[in-house]
Amino acid sequence: MKGELLDSYESAAVGAKLSKIGFLAVPGTNTVNKKLKEIVNKEECSIMDVESQSAALSAAIAAEACGKRAFLSIDRIESTREFLAASCMRLPIVAVSSDITALRDLGWLVFLPESNQEILDTVIQAYRICEDSKVLLPAAIKVDFPIRENILSPSEKSVDHFLPKLRLKRLDLRNPLVLDNTCFRDQQQKAMENALKAIETVNEKWGTKFKRSYPAVEEYFSESDYLLVVSGSDSPTAKAAVNKLREQGESIGLVRIRSLRPFPDMKVLDGKKVAVIDRDISLGSAGIVSSEIGYSSFIATKPINEKDVADIYSRLKASEKEETVWML
């Protein structure tokens, strides 16, 4: 492996290149698409410039149905219709976006990496998970880190050994196949359950091969009396704050959720006093994560700092009941 300074978008682009994508639809000129156009093998990957997100996803659906490994980079979710169709048609497309909360009920796997390194690795892992015959669902990976990090890129040969070639049932004009975009929710639900198992299996294989591990739920001093639940780019800051509080003798730990869909088992929280740091809200309900598991929700409207974490911990210790707090 070699080190290289990359931001989150460039990391996603390198992950897609190493995954040997066969189709790229480009709606606009965001950083991922710009980088991919520079580094992707033009002989192996078809690139299509399109006018909108909907056109990009429609093109990716068609390419994936024809047996091409498709990748998308979308700045924001403008329409959900094609996203729902991709899931109903059981097409293992992988996408990255800074706006993924709208996808949580559309049958897409949703990953929340905490670093640029994890973004690169998750793109590759996502293809292996999604292309599992017991899963066959699309995946979205959140990218929202403006800083550059030293990233270790696996060699193409090692990724080729890790990620088998895409083998979907291809469209054949001599043997027509109907791809129905009518949802069979029971089958999608079973696929999600299978995906949770696949995430752990693929992560174990990744850890053995590349010495980096990303479980669906990461436990950080989870034996503590007080636990924070975090996700995404807030996680490193929260870990640093937890370290300082523990040096002061506080019994505090952290649980990081990497997989928003499928949502993982959270038995680790049983018997603990818990606060959830959310970065978005399900309007009419609660924070995106706390709506899944309950507990007090601290909804951060900006990236958190170590003082924020210390304040959350102090309030958690003093509170008598669950509450929702906006951190403006």
Image: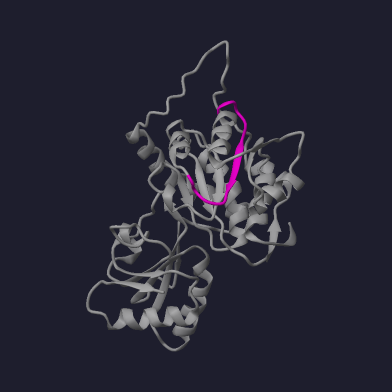
Classify residue 15 as left or right of residue 187: right
* Above or below: residue 45 compared with residue 264: above
If the image is split into quadrants, where does the C terminus sit?
bottom left
Task: Give percent across and percent down for residue 111.
Answer: 49, 53
Q: Residue at x 22, y 79 (%)?
A: 320
If the image is split into quadrants, where does the N terminus sit?
bottom right
Q: From this viewpoint, is residue 204 visible?
A: no
* Above or below: residue 114 compared with residue 92: below
Frontmost residue, 154 versus 88: 88
Q: Quadrant of residue 41?
A: top right
Frontmost residue, 328 versus 188: 328
Tell me where the magenta segment starts and ends, as one range: 65-78
Q: Quadrant of residue 279?
A: bottom left
Task: Give percent across and percent down for residue 186.
Answer: 32, 35
State the count of labels: 0
Residue at the limit of the structure toward the bottom, as seen here: 248
Q: Residue at x 53, y 59 (%)?
A: 113
Task: Give percent across and percent down for residue 185.
Answer: 34, 35
Residue at the limit of the structure toward the left, as seen here: 320
Frontmost residue, 135 versus 328: 328
Q: From this viewpoint, is residue 272 visible?
A: yes
Residue at the limit of the structure toward the front, as seen here: 51
Classify residue 274 as left or right of residue 153: left
Magenta segment includes 142 = no
Classify residue 278 as left or right of residue 318: right
Magenta segment includes 73 = yes
